[in-house]
Image (cartoon, rainbow, N blue to C red):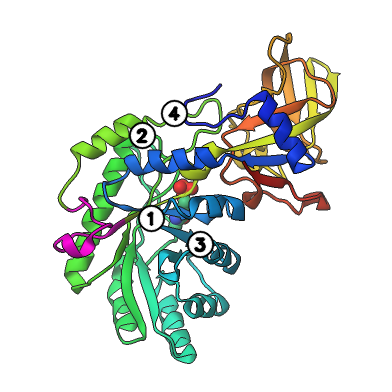
């Protein structure tokens, strides 16, 4: 079940974590696994590129505080995420406020805080220009360019998306910002998520780096940040391919160009090289988190053995049928203390919600369990509580701890 990158607490640790949390369900994030993930992902990124963590993957303050000394900055999407990043002691110029359609309130808050903002259309450029004038502040703009997301394999078709500035609007956005108190500080070329194939990752990085270079030359820009996305997958289902980290690092080595050499750490010494930054969410937080849940009941209906637990899709939407439309891989799961117990087939692990969609694992083999047993789902540290319909049935919010 395990791969070397996913943190899996031992049975003894799992029991103590539940005592520490006071109840289940609880997400437990390993501080050392977060550190390991940062080191692994950095080694698989262009050498010298800055590493930003995207709070959208997991905005839990304990996780953000643990990552703050290890990463070079944060990508945030709301006022609350911005406060979490700033409260971790991050200098505002290391925070990037992203999102395709920012409100006037968000624009004012980001400008007042002095964080950089992505600008994703001519109208949004006008909004930031006007708001900066009203507030009497200088702003830091990062123009997000629209980039189609590549297919999962090198020969698959890219898919279109709504993010960023269209090529034909770019000159207008540059014109509006240049005539405003908002300086053009950077470019963002995010190109998608959950890619396991290193060839796709490397080709995407190369393509967006070349495009950024062309834009810099066309407009004569001097930048201190060129974000070229992240895209590396997390492995949270049993059928997900493992990312070949060593191959990615090796291949990255072979693809190294003067442009990527020490680009972030020493931009002034880099002779006009692009100050690259990579933005990652899931590959940093995913492997570090486990969900612990208590078995509340078991029953057999027809040939199915149901194991009913206190965590549901309100805590972990990724697991539900709703998201994967029936084509769901199974979450990896372990029974705490289950070693040596007889295996039961056709087990369906279901949550406490009144919905047929509330299924955490379907038709799997699992050691025999009884009410009170703990189940542990490893590798689910990203897109958990913040990506789940926590309001459904007005249940208590899932607990989260860092250990
Ligand atoms: C702009 C941006 N940055 C970063 C991320 C984080 O991506 P991931 O979790 O795939 O690493 C996303 C994901 O949607 C994104 O849209």
* SS majority, magenta: loop
Taking 381 as reference, is 310 left or right? right
Residue at the image point whose x is 44% and y is 28% from the top: 242
Which residue has dot 1 on it? Answer: 190
The nearer-to-camera label among 2 and 3 is 3
Judge the density around disc 1: few (<14), some (14-19), many (≥20) Cα neighbours within 10 Å.
many
First in sequence, mark 4 or 1: give its number. 1
Q: Could you tell me how far apart the alpha carbons at marks 1 and 2 are, in whole angstroms? A: 17 Å
- SS assignment at label 3: strand
Which residue has dot 3 on it? Answer: 76
First in sequence, mark 2 or 3: give its number. 3
Judge the density around disc 3: few (<14), some (14-19), many (≥20) Cα neighbours within 10 Å.
many
- SS assignment at label 2: loop
Q: Could you tell me how far apart the alpha carbons at marks 4 and 2 are, in whole angstroms? A: 9 Å
* First to last magenta residue range: 259-276
Which residue has dot 4 on it? Answer: 242
Residue 270 is covered by the magenta coloring: yes
The nearer-to-camera label among 4 and 2 is 4
Residue 123 is covered by the magenta coloring: no
Query: Residue 220, which numbered label?
Result: none
Under 8 Å from ligand 1: the CB of mark 1?
A: yes
Which residue has dot 2 on it? Answer: 197
Q: In which quarter of the image is residue 143?
A: bottom left
Under 8 Å from ligand 1: the CB of mark 3?
A: no
Q: Position of residue 217 (x, y in %)?
A: 17, 67
- The image quadrant where one finds the C terminus is top right
Q: Where is residue 76 in the image (x, y as percent from the top left)?
A: 51, 62
């Amino acid at each position: 079940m395990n791969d070397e990158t996913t943190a899996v607490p031992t049975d003894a640790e799992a029991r103590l974590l539940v005592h520490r949390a006071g109840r289940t369900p609880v997400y437990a994030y390993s501080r050392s696994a977060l550190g390991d993930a940062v080191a692994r992902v950095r080694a698989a990124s262009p050498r010298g590129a800055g590493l930003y963590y995207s709070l959208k993957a997991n905005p839990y303050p304990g996780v953000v505080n643990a990552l703050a000394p290890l990463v070079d900055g944060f990508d945030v999407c709301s006022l609350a995420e911005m406060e979490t990043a700033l409260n971790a002691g991050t200098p505002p110029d290391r925070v990037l406020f992203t999102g395709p359609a920012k409100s006037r309130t968000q624009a004012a808050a980001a400008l007042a805080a002095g964080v950089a903002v992505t600008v994703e259309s001519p109208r949004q450029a006008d909004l930031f220009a006007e708001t900066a004038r009203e507030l009497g502040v200088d702003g830091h703009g990062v123009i997000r360019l629209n980039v189609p997301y590549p297919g999962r394999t090198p020969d698959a078709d890219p898919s279109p998306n709504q993010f960023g500035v269209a090529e034909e609007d770019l000159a207008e956005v540059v014109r509006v910002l240049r005539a405003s108190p908002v300086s053009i500080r950077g470019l963002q070329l995010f190109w998608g998520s959950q890619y396991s194939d290193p060839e796709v990752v490397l080709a995407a990085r190369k393509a967006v780096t070349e495009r950024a270079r062309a834009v810099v030359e066309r407009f004569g820009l001097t930048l201190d940040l060129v974000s070229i996305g992240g895209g590396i997958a997390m492995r949270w289902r049993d059928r997900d391919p493992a990312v070949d980290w060593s191959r990615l690092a090796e291949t990255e080595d072979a693809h190294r160009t003067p442009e990527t050499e020490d680009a972030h750490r020493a931009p002034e010494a880099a002779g006009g090289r692009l100050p690259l930054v990579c933005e990652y969410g899931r590959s940093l937080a995913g492997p570090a988190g486990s969900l612990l849940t208590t078995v509340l009941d078991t029953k057999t209906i027809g040939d199915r053995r149901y194991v009913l637990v206190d965590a549901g899709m309100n805590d972990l939407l990724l697991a539900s049928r709703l998201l994967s439309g029936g084509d769901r891989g199974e979450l990896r799961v372990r029974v705490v203390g289950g070693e040596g117990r007889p295996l039961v087939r056709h087990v369906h692990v279901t949550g406490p919600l009144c919905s047929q969609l509330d299924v955490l694992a379907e038709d799997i083999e699992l050691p025999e369990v009884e009410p009170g047993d703990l189940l542990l789902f490893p590798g689910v540290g990203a897109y958990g509580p913040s990506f789940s319909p926590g309001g459904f049935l007005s249940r208590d919010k899932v607990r989260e701890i860092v250990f």
